[in-house]
Amino acid sequence: MKKYLPLIVRILISALFLLSAVAKSFPIWAFEKQLVDLGIVNWCNAPYLARLIIALETAIAIAILQRHYIKTFVIPVTIFLLITFCAHLGLQMVEHGAMNGNCGCFGQLIPMTPLEAFVKNIVTIIMLIYLFKNVSNKEKGENNFIVILFIYFLSAFLMFFFFPFCPCKNTNDKITAQLPVIIDSSIIINDTIHQSIKDNNTTIKNTKDSKDVKKDTSIETEIKIKEPAFTTSKFAVYTDFNGKKINLDEGKKIVCLFVPGCDHCRDAAKEIVKISKLHKLPPIYVLFMNEEVYKIPEFYTETKINYPYHVIDDIPTFFKLLGNNATTPGIAYLWNGNIIKSYEGLDNNKFNAGEILKIIETNQQ
């Protein structure tokens, strides 16, 4: 058994890195988003870095099974990488907590907390140290570094070949150039009331009769919000919904950003359907991310929605629409291109049906 133990350890380490590479690849956009959320790269560079990292893990999985520079290069580099990851995980645990969130080591396939990933890396380092003491390079003169390079470049080539993407054409394109116009509806209400009261020469402050005050202040609940000026929103570039031309910046619209296979997106869609049966809502349009698009019919069947949709082919662009570090589902209420209210993810700004209904009803004219 002792004779075969180094081989068993090498196979275990290889399987670990290969599993990590495969898990990060399905879906690869989730790993790209994690790199962006960590502030390591922007969306234009994330596809490149994600594929190079996965290629490195694949190359390690292969290189650990061969003998070219196994002791003088492959094992030391692998240990160094794991120590670097441990340092990163340590910072994450200090900042966000040891059991908070998914570290992404095994992508979405096997969620791991930072502490679990840290322990996993320490165990792997111990296994590599054991391996370092019990293996040797090929005989002097037989080692060939080209073999190591070939393994990595082949891994990288396969990643870019099987996971193609559209490079950023212009960092100043329409999406990145357009900043969302977000309006605080409470400010609009107050300003409109103030102006309306002024225009009607209402002097509530100086009224002595309490009945008159009550009568005058009731005006506030009947005053409608002033229609905002037209502007160009970040959604304006999407005009084709199920073959029909739509101007999302014209009038009042609700725009939903969903992923076809996202359970939380489906829950939000069901909630919208529920309130739409009881209240009149503005026209609703869906922007789907180009991931598991074959699930769109299933999405419509389960949620009972019947809203027109458009599929955004470029995944980074989809997340730019959501906002920095934001996650699905995303829902925005627009009026003449102005974003009156928007919701993203499942945390503090998650979709609130009661709140958006109140805002929409206040805006009714």
Image (cartoon, grey):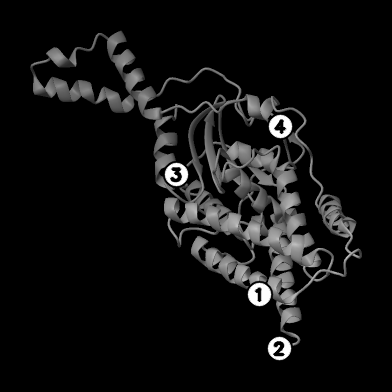
Give the side of residue 150 with respect to residue 287, left or right.
Answer: right
Q: CA distance from mark 4 to mark 1?
A: 60 Å
> Which residue is under mark 2?
2
Q: CA distance from mark 1 to mark 2?
A: 12 Å
User: Is 281 situated above or below 132?
Assistant: above
Closer to the observer: label 4 or label 1? 1
**Which quadrant holds the N terminus?**
bottom right
Mark 4 or mark 1: name the one nearer the start of the chain: 1
Give the side of residue 328 with respect to residue 5, left or right.
Answer: left
Q: Quadrant of residue 201?
A: top left
The three-letter code of the residue at mark 4 reads Thr
Mark 1: few/some/many CA within 10 Å (<14, 14-19, 20+): some
Q: CA distance from mark 3 to mark 2?
A: 57 Å
> Which residue is under mark 4?
239
Mark 3 or mark 4: name the one nearer the start of the chain: 4
The three-letter code of the residue at mark 3 reads Asn
**Which quadrant holds the C terminus?**
top left
Q: Residue at x 64, y 65 (%)?
A: 109
Q: Position of residue 273 (x, y in %)?
A: 53, 51
> Which residue is under mark 3?
349
Mark 1 or mark 3: name the one nearer the start of the chain: 1
